[in-house]
Image (cartoon, rainbow, N blue to C red):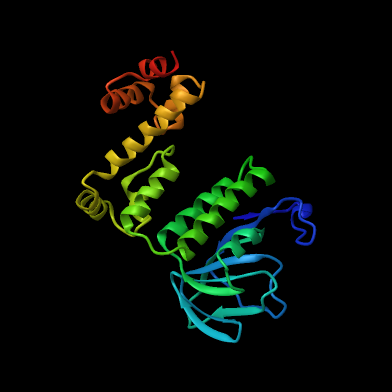
């Protein structure tokens, strides 16, 4: 769990940063909550286990595993467990980000489904807020978390293939696995491979390779980073493997490509 403890970053009326991650956490035995004046932060909360009754905006809703509630700050709400079992909740709270919320015309509150992509993104956010992170670094990764989530919730539906392609474009520098990519469209790795090859005529990993090499070509032409660093920035931790993949795609070594275009 992460909680911001520096009070100067928790002042909603006079914020020190345009976006602040306040808390990221979960509890396996959620107690009753009653906030007639609302909460000091915007919050995204979802159920990971059990069942709860939620009251907000005159609505009463039973939420079970995978269901969630978003509330803007100062919106009155309450919730408690229902039944004999514990209520397991997970949440992210933040200040700022009104520009993103208003861009998508996000209402004062709404209910949502917490899919695997949100759970994975919350895990990454929690990790990024630990250790040697700073308020500024947390602000950056937190705003990206919010923007990605809002895009998924409010932008018009796109095909699974387009969502996969966008995810590869956004995360090409990371050591992606088929399981991670499939989680973005709720497919296991086998269904993902069959679907993408049938729909696009190319495998997912071939698509990722093409994206990485296209990015590498841009870096080689317009940046002065060492070739090994270009490979690393494009998802290749092994310089020899980067060279092999680049030659397969372009017919030239990274060095020959750079010399040709910068000679």
In which quarter of the view is residue 59 placed? bottom right
Is 138 or 170 nearer to us in this picture?
A: 170
Q: Residue at x 43, y 57 (%)?
A: 117
Is 74 or 219 nearer to us in this picture?
A: 219
From the top left corner, tell me how far across and down residue 242 is, in percent. Answer: 35, 25
Is residue 42 shown above or below 255?
Answer: below
Is 193 or 262 nearer to us in this picture?
A: 262
Q: Is residue 118 rendered to the left or right of residue 80?
A: left
Is residue 142 shown above or below 247?
Answer: below
From the top left corner, tell me how far across and down residue 54 is, in percent. Answer: 55, 80
In which quarter of the view is residue 110 placed? bottom right
From the top left corner, tell me how far across and down residue 134 is, in percent. Answer: 67, 43
Q: Residue furthest top?
A: 263
Q: Residue at x 38, y 16 (%)?
A: 260
Q: Is residue 166 rendered to the left or right of residue 97?
A: left
- Quadrant placement of the C terminus: top left
Q: Residue at x 59, y 55 (%)?
A: 1
From the top left corner, tell me how far across and down residue 78 is, in percent. Answer: 62, 79
Q: Residue at x 79, y 62 (%)?
A: 13
């Amino acid at each position: 769990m992460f909680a911001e403890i520096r009070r100067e970053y928790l002042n909603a009326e006079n914020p020190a940063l345009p976006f602040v991650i306040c808390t990221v956490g979960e509890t396996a035995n959620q107690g009753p909550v009653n906030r007639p004046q609302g909460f000091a932060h915007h919050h995204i909360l979802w159920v990971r286990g059990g069942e709860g009754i939620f009251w907000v905006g005159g609505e009463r809703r039973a939420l079970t595993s995978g269901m969630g509630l978003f509330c803007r700050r100062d919106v009155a709400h309450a919730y408690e467990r229902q039944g004999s079992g514990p209520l397991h909740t997970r949440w992210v709270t933040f200040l700022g980000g009104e520009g993103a919320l208003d861009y998508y015309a996000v209402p004062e509150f709404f209910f949502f489904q917490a899919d695997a992509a949100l759970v994975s993104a919350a895990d990454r956010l929690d990790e990024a807020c630990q250790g040697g992170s700073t308020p500024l670094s947390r602000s950056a990764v937190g705003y990206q978390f919010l923007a990605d989530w809002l895009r998924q919730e409010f932008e018009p539906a796109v095909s699974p293939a387009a969502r996969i392609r966008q995810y590869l474009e956004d995360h090409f520098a990371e050591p992606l696995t088929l399981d991670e990519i499939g989680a973005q469209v709720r497919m296991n790795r086998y269904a993902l491979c069959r679907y993408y090859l049938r729909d696009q005529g190319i495998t997912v990993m071939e698509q990722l390779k093409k994206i990485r090499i296209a990015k590498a070509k841009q870096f080689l032409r317009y940046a002065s980073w060492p070739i090994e660093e270009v490979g690393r920035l494009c998802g290749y931790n092994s310089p020899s493997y980067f060279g092999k993949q680049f030659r397969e795609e372009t017919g030239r070594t990274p060095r020959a490509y750079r010399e040709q275009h910068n000679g």
